[in-house]
Amino acid sequence: MDIQFERVSYTYQMNTPFSYQALKDINMEIKTGEFVAVVGHTGSGKSTLLQHINGLLLPTEGQVQVGDFQLSRDNKRQDLKKLREKVGVVFQYPEHQLFEETVERDISFGLKNFQIPAEETQARIASALEKVHLSDDVLQKSPFELSGGQMRRVAIAGVLAMDPEVLILDEPTAGLDPKGQHDVMNMFYDLHKTKHMTTILVTHQMNHALKYADYIFVLADGRVHMEGSPEHIFSQVESLEEANLDIPDILSLINQINQKFGTDLCYKRQKPDELAKEIMEQLRENKPL
Amino acid sequence: MMTAIEFRDVYFRYNEDAPWVLKKFNLKIEENETVAIIGHNGSGKSTIAKLANGLLVPQAGDILINGRKLTASNVWEIRQNIGMVFQNPENQFVGTTVRDDVAFGLENRGIPRKEMIKRIHTSLTQVGMENYQDHEPHNLSGGQKQRVAIASVMATYPEILLLDEATSMLDPRGRKEILSTIHDLKEELEITMVMITHDLHEIILTDRVIVMNQGQIYKDTTVDHLFNDYQGLQSIGLSLPLTVELAIELERQYDYQFTTYPLDNEEFLKALWTSNLKE
């Protein structure tokens, strides 16, 4: 499902003294099967934007096209159920939305709501659990007995059970420890690679945007401030500054090495061992004196 | 020197069917120390903070604050000496303005108005928020909210400051703001600081690092020595900073020898520079 924003603006509490324009004239195109990152400082409009993709918010101006669905201000609410079946959203701290008595019932809640035939339920649950790397002995447990990381996986499984074509991730690693972050991001990246799922990662972690995204949109003050490949975006340090963002750790280190030693290193998603090797090779070539 | 926080043979679990989170746990934190407690999710690190200020009560063992045993009857009084800042900046506001919010803790303690005004000003200045007294908390950024939360705590003149993953919900800029605030507090004041964290940038500010694993102290060390046993840290689910990973690779592939692993870019560049000259 291709996604297209055409001159989209959104104003909260329109026509009241509290009206606040969160999105301003957004144009954006996301192709089927892409992994896109939407980055921006707190308050830049990231969350408002993502809620337009599954019709939780409708644009006050302009229109959003998601596959065959057209979203604009005069859409009828009931049209959106089919869309929401196809666009899965993993919200921030999704484990806060768990509420059922057992993991199994929690995962099947969405399936029931979307009238997925009962005979499919078991297979869907099993496959969702497998995707989030949980074994089926959690099914009969209360979700609240599980650890934080496991709870988050259960909540994500609930979204994946719908077999969405587009997956929107809003800060999916917030509050996890570094290993948990790594595991969750790799899980999403695998799904993207193996199931060709269109993935939209909303984050302020530049390290993740650099590592996983094919294409990055930088939002600032409700507008698309920059867009392009990670290489392009992160080479524009000053423009990022304007959006109150920093470049990823690994790039700032590489830049500093280049500056200090006159080397010519560039980031190509090297592993630490490869990068260490390149640093040494270049240092030996460039040896002063 | 006085011991600020002491755990003696502490046992704790969340309910009777649950496994022990802490089992025969012992820990001593001295006055004016800055200590980081790290560990993966579920290693018991947050439980320690909540036990230390009496939010949780151990099933067995003693907890002593400034040499006094924490009991049901003195917990309110002892808690006056321990300021705690939590993870979520959204959950710790009561006032409608920044000033009211800082005043709240002082009013509760019956501090006279004149003194209150002075303390509010001082503590907001300490965190660089003195120009925001009349602002509404919900209009502040995450980093600013956490700084106000720290000011609210500091205004009560605690002897111990506990930060329970205080930066984990902030964006990178907010995180930097808090780190420099913590740094300044440490420079200016004599205070015991305990940071529960998995952010390695926070660890750099500390004198001592305690690594928790399965309710036990896995390692009690300093920042400089923390990564000497990097395999061990990885095996208990902690990840290494980029500069440490690169340093390890330099040792493995080339004849580098690091006495301490570089924790930030500057240290890494310095190490490269020195050895590049030697060759």
Image: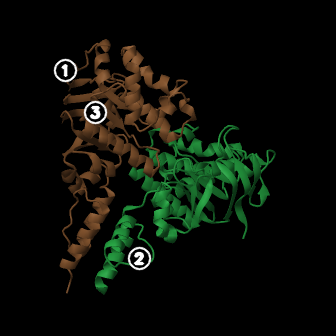
Chain colours: A brown, B green
Q: Chain of mark 2?
A: B
Vertical placement of residue A57 versus B3, above or below: above
Provide the residue designation for mark 1: A68
- Chain bearing tag 3 is A
- In this rendered view, identify the residue nearer to me: B273 or A239: B273
Mark-to-mark CA distance, 1 and 3? 23 Å
Instruction: Give the spatial CA distance, label 3 vs label 2.
Output: 50 Å
Which label is found at residue A118?
none
User: Going by the image, does B255 lie left or right of A224?
Assistant: right
**Residue name at image x 21 percent, y 66 percent:** A265
In depth, the one of B151 and B133 nearer the eye is B151
Q: Amino acid at mark 3?
A: Leu
Q: Which quadrant is home to the N terminus of chain B?
A: bottom right
C-alpha span from label 1 to label 2: 59 Å
Dividing the picture into quadrants, the one containing residue A190 is top left
Considering depth in this image, is B112 or B162 the residue closer to the camera? B162
Identify residue for label 3.
A23
Q: Position of residue A179 (x, y in %)?
A: 44, 51
Asked whether the viewer can see residue B114, the reply is no
Q: Chain of mark 1?
A: A
Instruction: Using a 10 Å C-alpha cutoff, classify the residue at mark 3 as few (fewer than 14 neighbours), some (14 to 19) or many (20 or more).
Output: many
